[in-house]
Amino acid sequence: MTPEQFVAGLPKAELHMHVEGSIEPDLFLRLARRNGVAIRWSTEEELRAAYRFSDLQDFLDLYYDGCRVLVRAQDFHDVTRAYMRRAHADSVLHCELFFGPQGHTSRGVPIAAVMDGVLGAMEEARAQDGITGGLIAVAQRHRSEEEALAMLDELAPWHERLLGFGLGGAEVGNPPAKFARFFERCRTLGFKVVAHAGEEGPAAYVRESVELLQVQRVDHGNACVDDAALVSELARRRMPLTMCPLSNLKLQVIDSVAEHPLKRLLDAGLCVTVNSDDPSYFGGYVNDNYLACQQAFGLSRQDLAQLARNSFEAAFIPQEQRLAAFAQVDDWLARAVGPELEAKE
Ligand code: ADE
Ligand code: ZN
């Protein structure tokens, strides 16, 4: 079995994927036409050529502008359903999706259109493919904490349908502490909380997310490698990091995947997971990210299986579902390495 075949069939969870970052160029053009939204590109090739970024802000400018093609519930349904179909084909059993309500409501899109579309697609995917999903609303960190609190209130009719809340967008200059009251309120209401930290920002932002915001997972977290005491603390807590190597490459956080801290942190005992972030913009879905790591670090099948196990350990799922997923990972590993081990004996 080749690494490609092993990764393709490896049961996994994806925990860091933005719905708005999964609009493939063909769907993007169709949605623009369907909604009469003027865009700068007319072909898929032109769009793909535009997906070159110098840093996070350069990407966010295009990404927030691209959200304009999402207008009606059907649009949110179509993009979510397309991602989940693709994830299912990548042996993703469970996914936790980020979405950014503020990027839509600030354009006059009713929050009900967003929620009805995304939730309807998640139900359909579960019924048709058996893939489970959860939803995490992300506050944009360049906006104020008051706006994040208003988003939380606006989502009140859907609180039962949400897993939790997160923090994304322009990191440098917008430290986690800016959102301390928002996170406290989310936690008090019983939500899971996560935050992007240490993508472009410093190790101190990772520490602040964990200690002050009391997040249950850190999204990216790369910069923690700069603080040895923090790495030890994250390992002690088994704090999950939802890492996204191809995203980091495209946004020039790293110059090559071999430079990525993922393997160092995995070896240090952290609960590292592999994810795609914004797959249509960064040219890779979750399996492409696993394979990029496999190639850059020469990961063994045991390493890849450990990453998949970590994804279920870090997922916000019932323990019964977690144990069943662990067993599926172990079965797949046994099937893949069984003949090799027998041959060596
Ligand atoms: N929103 C979508 N993708 C993001 C990223 N890589 N970092 C911060 N916010 C984001
Ligand atoms: Zn992200």
Image (cartoon, helix red, strand yellow):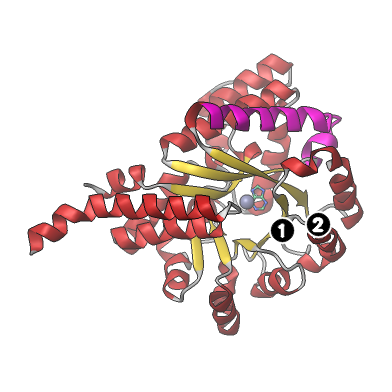
Q: Position of residue 222 (x, y in %)?
A: 56, 66
Q: At which x and y percent is residue 206?
A: 66, 70
Q: In the rendered structure, are the residues bearing label 2 and label 1 in contact, judged by CB atoms less than 8 Å apart?
A: yes
Query: For the residue marked with disc 1, what is the amino acid?
Result: Val
User: In the image, 343: left or right of 96?
Assistant: left
Q: Name the residue tied to disc 2.
A: 186
Q: Which residues are magenta?
A: 102-127
Dot 2 falls on a residue whose secondary structure is: helix
Residue 193 position, x and y percent, is: 71, 58
Q: Can you name the residue that lies furthest to the front here?
A: 320
Q: Type of residue at label 2? A: Cys
Q: Is residue 122 left or right of residue 129?
A: right
Magenta residues, dominant SS class: helix
- Identify the secondary structure beneath mark 1: strand
| Residue 103 visible within the image | yes
Q: Would you identify the image quadrant in which residue 42 lies?
A: top right
Q: Which residue occupies the foreground of this view, 251 or 129?
A: 129
**Is 107 covered by the magenta stretch?**
yes
Tell me if 135 is positioned left or right of 334 in this view: right
The residue closer to the viewer here, 300 or 284, is 300
In the image, residue 110 sits, relative to residue 165, either above or below, namely: above
**Residue 284 visible in the current orientation:** no
Q: Earlier in the sequence, mark 2 or mark 1?
A: 2
Q: Is mark 2 within 8 Å of ligand 1?
A: no
Looking at the image, residue 306 lies above or below residue 44: below
Q: Which mark is residue 87?
A: none
The quadrant of the image that shows the C terminus is bottom left
- Residue at horizontal 89%, vertical 45%? 153
Residue that carries the numbered disc 1 in the rendered image:
193
